[in-house]
Image (cartoon, rainbow, N blue to C red):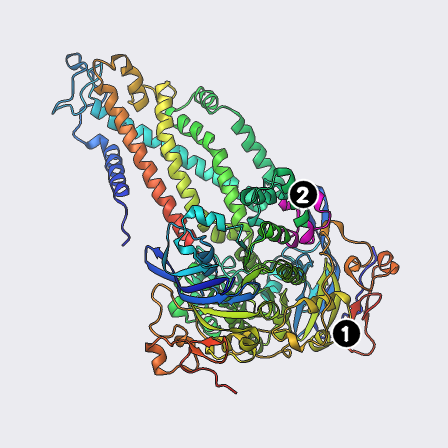
Amino acid sequence: MTGPLLEVDDLQTHFHLPHGTLRAVDGVSFTLDAGRTLGIVGESGSGKSVLARSIIGLLPMAQARKAGGRVLFAGRDLRQLSEGQMRQVRGREIAMIFQDPLTSLNPVLTIGRQIVQVLRQHTDLSTAAAKVRAVELLNEVGIPDPKQRAGEYAHRMSGGMRQRIVIAIALACNPRLLIADEPTTALDVTVQAQILDLLRRLQDRHAMALILITHNLGVVAEMCDDVAVMYAGRIVEQAPVGDILERPRMRYTHALLQSVPDIDNPSHARLPVIPGQPPNLISPPVGCRFAPRCGFRQDRCDTDMPPHSEAGAHHRFACFNPVPEH
Amino acid sequence: MAGSGTAHLQREGALLSAHNLVRTYKAKGGRRVQALSDVSLDIVAGETLGVVGESGSGKSTLARAIMALPAPDSGAVAFDGADMLAARGAGLRSLRHRMQMVFQDPLSSLNPAHRILDIVEMPLLVAGRGTAAERRRIVLETLGRVGLDGEQIGHRRPYELSGGQCQRVSIARALVLRPRLLVCDEPVSALDVSVQAQVLNLLEDTKAAFALTMLFISHDLGVVKSISDRVAVMYLGKLCEIAPTDSLYAAPRHPYTTTLLAAVPSLKPRQRTQQPQMPRGETPSPLDVPSGCRFRTRCPAATERCAREEPQIRAIEDTPGHFVACHHPG
Amino acid sequence: MRRYPLPVVVSLAWLVLVALATLLAAWLPMQDPTKQSLLNMLAPPSLERWFGADSLGRDVFSRTIHGFRISFAVSFGAAAVGLVFGGALGICAGYFRGWSERMILIGVNIVLAFPPLVLIIAMVAYPGEALLKVVLALGIVYIPTVTRVARANTLLFSEKEFVTAARAAGMSDARLIVRELLPNLVPVLLTYFLLLVAVGVLAEAGLSYLGLSVPPPVPTLGQMMASEQANALEAPHAIFFPAGMLFLTIFALNLVGEEVQRRIDDRAGTA
């Protein structure tokens, strides 16, 4: 198969609320090749979670509207598919895991049963064969005593275990793309290291593409090939991970990197601060959405939306007054 | 049960000194969980002591125990020259006014039925300080010090404010009585990265402006490093290591501290000198703590002695102020 | 000014109308509700008698309005008894926990174990002023559920950090309950109060139908329906109007209660 595995083109998702239309994702475009890892970084309100759910089609339909754009997965536009067709895709070709493993698992079913359910839904396996496969999967994600655990319930297990089970369920049908929405945010730091390591190994073994959504720049640094930084519903910078970390151009990316209290910083380092708060997405500012908080704002930043500029291969950013190259 | 030792406690200059704190909870099925197992700690006036640990370490329980909210099951807490746990009535209230707390969840730490001005005024009312007009003046002034315009937001309710603003209100409330000690229990964990930086800087500024001493609890090692003078590491209700910040981060001696530091994802992974070792296993359940050293089930350096004998906290010879509870420190 | 949905406005208007009529019943130009008239037995509705007359010639409209006086007195009274005592017990149980909580819950379970009707019959059998007895009896039946609701919500709020903050400032328990917890409990308890009032109107109608409420000659809705049910086919108006008024009033109470609930949820949801 040639071409990227996933191509998102000017994606828009709006929420119709009583007090206005919330433009949660407002024109997002990116591509992802098979087997690669893309990190989507942003703070709350950036639209990163809504973006993930828009790709896989898991939006609360009462208020959300697919307002525009295409999501091309292996050439097919997912936005055009019916719900029935999307259900074939979900779990089988694209899987998703979420932040809180406890609420992702059904408390009244054994974990073995939950894996078997997914397998029976998307494959031709008999129940007996599916049970065997479920134990294999539990073993693959590092659960000790998998045969025993398959008969247990989720609430007896630790957060790390549960997240492993969630990953096992996601991987059951060998999806080509895994979307992970803040998969380690609720976990202890040592467990996080183990889960990220597991994701890396599984990704290699299954040649799976991974979209990792997080606010933690350290996780992005360790896990991702490419990074897209989101702010107020749009991607403001996108580049390979090394470029983003060492040569950020857009002012928000740069300020964000500076304000993280990194463990390798010297102690008692005073953190440079981004003043103010993210904008209201119902009536976002005209022009660059970061302008009201930007220390390098120019007049045209307030009136015009900066277009994407190139800064070397695969490095795009949207800024009128970017960090200078050196 | 063998104690964990108090070798790391200073003799003078301690604003708060906690000895041998124990706190147990009843878990389901009647079993007992020791959230704090003989922990001793002291805080020198004017310093910021950071306490790090993962879930089940007991760090939040420690914060509440030293404030007697509620009091620990056993142990002693001396604060500002007085016995915190023996105090009652007016004496206890007076001590409480000198020790205030900032909490993790910005929204649930503020009463949703009250307005901001009332929330910040509450400690002054309880302490019976001044007239209504004087209290109002202090409230507005303190709100200003934390970067909020009391006239503008004073009549709003907490759910009308952002997380960062709520946290500032929380800090203002903690400051109105001009306490000596500020206990911060994960104050920035629920905030966005950019807001986190704002609140951390605010805490540093107010510490200087109000001449505070701070106890800063967090699971985030980067945050703790940026704000603390000394750092204590806890695991399953015990103190593992305590040292000045630079010393702890540059040269950790306890295997758990090393594991913890190695597990933190860094923005500059290429600068790491060696491939960090992956942490082994998971934290045991607090209902079933390992005998002897609690970390031994996951420790690469564990020996038979570690199962038999609980390590006492000892000084590290060549590094002043650096103490560790380990039979085989690195 | 917030806009209220039309059904709620209509319900509120209806309730206000009925409430005013019952409050001012003594002064309104209505027929005497107890005056019998052989001439007008089962007279159909007319301009003089809006709801017609019952089997003893008494004016149904006037009796209905007077009947509502008892309905409201009992329902509000019982709901208030339930709220005050149940609320106090529930808050104590939820705040202080331990021994007092266990005792209160045991008491709640004991009262709940009795079928409510049996309880009320037993209490009403005592000598004493009828209205007071009914109010207390129904109120006591209400107390256990109010206790549970109050306890559950107190537990919820007691665990929040703003309560710890108040303790850290040295606030006494009593002051904490009143200043910090009560304002948060009022919305829930208020909604529950309205629910109890609606239930109480219906309960009183049932009790008076069985003859357990205030006895004649004071008109009560249930008793009106009981005495006229023999004539239901010939003179439906004598039952239809009181029953219809009852239905509309309870419906209105429920609608208003739901709107209050929705506004409370909205406010909590914004948080």
Depth order, front residue of A66/C148: A66
User: Is A274 inside the magenta-drawn segment?
Assistant: no
Q: Amino acid at mark 1?
A: His
Q: Which quadrant holds residue B40?
A: bottom right
Q: Residues within 10 Å of mark 1 (few under 14, many from 20)?
A: many
- Residue that mark 1 sits on: B322
Depth order, front residue of C218/B308: B308
Mark 1 lies on a secondary structure that is loop
Q: Which quadrant holds residue B161?
A: bottom left
Q: Which mark is residue A132?
A: 2
Q: Vertically, is C198 above or below B238?
A: above
Q: How many marks?
A: 2
Q: Chain of mark 2?
A: A
- Is B327 placed left or right of A208 in the picture? right
Where is residue C34 drawn, in percent x and y? 23, 20
Most extreme residue toward the front, as rendered?
A: A1
Where is residue B193 drawn, in percent x and y? 53, 69
Asked whether residue B157 is in view, the answer is no
Q: Residues within 10 Å of mark 2 (few under 14, many from 20)?
A: some
Where is residue B275 drawn, in percent x and y? 72, 71
Q: Vertically, is B114 above or below B250?
A: above
Mark 2 lies on a secondary structure that is helix
The reply to whether dot 2 and dot 1 touch (C-beta < 8 Å) is no
Q: Mark 2 or 1, which is nearer the eye?
A: 2
Q: Chain of mark 1?
A: B
Depth order, front residue of C52/C83: C52
- Cα–Cα span, label 2 and label 1: 52 Å
Magenta part of the chain = A139-163
Q: Amino acid at mark 2?
A: Val
Q: Which mark is residue B126?
A: none
Which residue is rendered at x = 28% and y = 15% of the image? C229
